[in-house]
Amino acid sequence: MINLNTSEQNTWCPGCHNFVILSCAKKAVSELINEGHAKHEDFVTVTGIGCHAKLYDYINTSGFYGLHGRAIPTANGITLGNPKLKVMTFAGDGDVYAEGISHFINAARVNPNYALFVNNNKIFALTTGQVTPTSEKGFPGRSTPKGNPFTPMNPVSLALEAGASFVAREYSLDVKNLTETMKAAIKHKGFAYVDIIQPCITFHNFTEYVKDKMYRLNGPFEYKKAMEKAKEWDYSDSADAKIPVGIFYEEERPTLSDLFDNKNWSEAYPERKINSALWERFKV
Amino acid sequence: MEFQITIAGEAGQGIAKSAEIVSKDFVSRGFYVFNYRDYGSLIRGGENFNVLRISDEPVYSNDWTNDFAILFGKFSSHHLNKMKQNGISIGTLEGVQAKMNPSLIIKEIGANKIVENAVLLGALYKAMGQPIEALIKQMETYGKHTKVNQIAAQKGYDTYNGEVNEIRFNVRKGNRYYVSGSNAISQGAIASGMDLYIAYPMTPATPVLHILARVKDDVRAIQLENEIGVISAGLGASFAGANVMVGTSGGGFALMNEALSLQGISEIPIVTYMCMRPGPATGIPTYTGQGDMQFVLNSGHGEYSKVVIAPGDPKEAFERTAEAFYLANKYRVLSVLLTDKHLAESDYTFDSSPTFRVKPTRNLVNQSKDYLSYKITEDGNSPRAVPGKGIARATSYEHDEMGYTVEESEKIKIMVEKRLRKAKTLEDAVKKLEPITVYGKGKRLVISWGSTKGAIVDAIKLLEDTRFLQISYLKPFPSEEVKKEIEESLDVAIIENSATGQIAALIRENTGLEIKKKILKYDGRPFGYLELADKIKEMFK
Ligand SMILES: Cc1ncc(C[n+]2csc(CCOP(=O)(O)OP(=O)(O)O)c2C)c(N)n1
Ligand SMILES: [Mg+2]
């Protein structure tokens, strides 16, 4: 049994849903290893910056603790460098939907082969409670004391619109389904996006709001139906909302690395002489 | 013995291609050609021109008066007063010595408008007393348009009845290499074992993206969504084990800054090709300047080591690209190849091949169970390993040897000091790579870096008692070497294609010596060698 724990001191708030997400991630990785899907050394945990990103310190795999907003392009590069790696990218809603939104839309389009988990607490948590693009209108964040003036974006329908090849939503406390969907996302060949609804117990606790509104999809669906389902909830706090969770959509198409021949450059490594013959190409 | 030709016309009239044909013909016959390209940020309408300086001795720059000119289209009249005494101008403009009507000639042969330039090239060959067969042979590179261009050229040659100024001199035989900076960087990168080139288009760095996208070698050129995406993916790919170069100009480099700083703390090797245009902001996209030097040296927040290399010509660019990859991989640092439009887009002729001071290395160790991504070492350099074979970590936070986040004062100091020790290690490494070069002899010294080399080397041949110190490594800075050269001189000036002369500040920072004399040019154009010789003479009067 591979030990995925590290001895780093955990600094999440007691009761933070990130503990659950972390344990689901470890469970998913260890089951995938046991099922022979991948080896321990193949996994790479990529993170952005935020509370969610501390996961890098708490999981014993290779890892890349990136910049705020840049987990996606960093992961793009990792799959280009070595397409055999199993990359799990954890990012926050601030990371992906604010700072790095252009990377999200373009990644959905070019289909890099990795799983993107967005720990969506509808708040900038590590910077102590400002609104993000998925915060509901009226929410009194610390930079918007009179209430968030803007309506939220719907990242799930955006991902579908942008061409993501795997789109899902899960809830941070649903251990069984979150673990299963994580595994499916990691196994998916292409850009697998999972929005994890994760109430922040300190700065934005919407547990009561989502608790009774979620229902399970029997997806994946064909595109049009998936889009309809994606639009059922607009990330607002409307009282009569229904929040579908599960897999909305899945398709297989060439990945970013496929398009560049899936070369594993890390293996193309014999020490060699400089190929000075290339200078001869300029001979007239 | 030498002469200069300007070929000017409207964008879209095949000016650059005409210049290439003439250049390659002369180079193939043993001449040395320097080809300066001047074009605006536009696709059609507006002027393009090329200046070809052709000689039986090596030449690395041009000047601004011509022995011959093809002036074609409505924008080129300003070249009329740049003719030498016995110069011959040919073209369609009012005021040229030999007026031609290529549109009539192409009608006669039933050809398309785009071969009008071939008519004028034929006329030029007659005016230069050069064999038309040589031009016609060179036109074989036109592919399916070869025949019609050849007919048009012959017709131009036969029709020309202006003056003839026969060029007659003997050239030494031997190998000739005709190459631009963009081509040299591209091939140099492949030669050094690059796997991936990642970029977002930005003039004047774009030609490298185009060249590498076309090559059949085992490399991939990839365009991503923006420069932040480019450098982040570059670091990701290098972390995974690829040998990566990213490329851009000033604006894109500005966007890359946060991730360049991430390079500093994560110690992931990467090479950045930074090709300057004049700024600020969008500036002058298709013109040249060296004004981003201090920005590049000081790029990335935080305190960490990097390498900034400034090759002076395409051959050096080929050699120094190898060093950029070597140093990046060996010491897990960022190597910036700092060039500009003038170096990237001018073509130079060489008669020898590059020599290399380094062997390529990916510098990967076999991971054992106890591999530490940030092992504390005496020289500050930690062994490099990649994920896939064992555990490898990279992080933007301050960290311990394993790569786990730390905030404790003792642990922070240990890692900061490890990185500091790398600065000294790099300094020692760069000392072995000929960071400076001195040209000529004399008590008076001009100092410069980068693409000004060509005009300076050509200018000091015309001057007495003047030598040239070229600084090829801006970081780590070869302080002792530069100090010694300055102290051995009676008079010193710096030369820079910028408005403020940033190399003077860099020299003062590193040697304590202040150089007050500055020869500067900041109109987007490179120095002409005669122009520069006059300015140096004036400065040392
Ligand atoms: C370029 C940059 N801007 C701002 C910050 C400050 N910052 C750190 S975490 C964070 C927000 C994190 O929010 P989110 O991504 O939602 O993660 P969470 O803390 O909610 O898990 C910000 C703005 C930063 N680190 N880098
Ligand atoms: Mg958040």
Image (cartoon, rainbow, N blue to C red):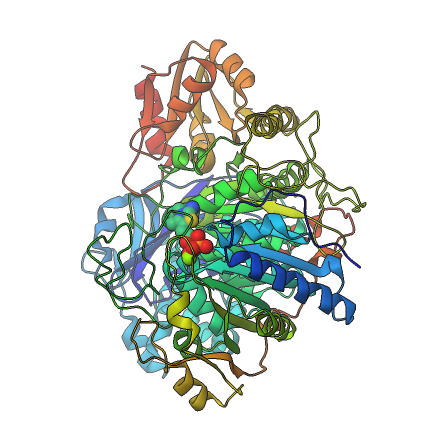
Determine whether A143 is above or below B449 in the image. below
- Left or right of A222? Residue B358 is right
Residue B205 visible in image: no
Determine whether A98 is above or below B252 in the image. below
Determine whether B259 is above or below B299 in the image. below
Residue B468, percent across and down? 48, 23
Residue B18 position by quadrant: bottom left
Residue B343, percent across and down? 46, 44
Q: Which quadrant is home to the C terminus of chain B?
A: top left
Q: What residue is rendered at 39% in x and 68% in y?
A: A208
Residue B328, percent across and down? 62, 40
Count of numbered tags = 0
Residue B85 position by quadrant: top left
Residue B487 visible in image: yes
Viewer-closest of B415 and A259: B415
Quick check: which quadrant has ligand 2? bottom left
Viewer-closest of A262 and B191: A262
Determine whether B437 is above or below B528 in the image. above
Residue B270, percent across and down? 58, 46
Q: What residue is rendered at 55% in x and 37% in y?
A: B398
Viewer-closest of B422 and B359: B422
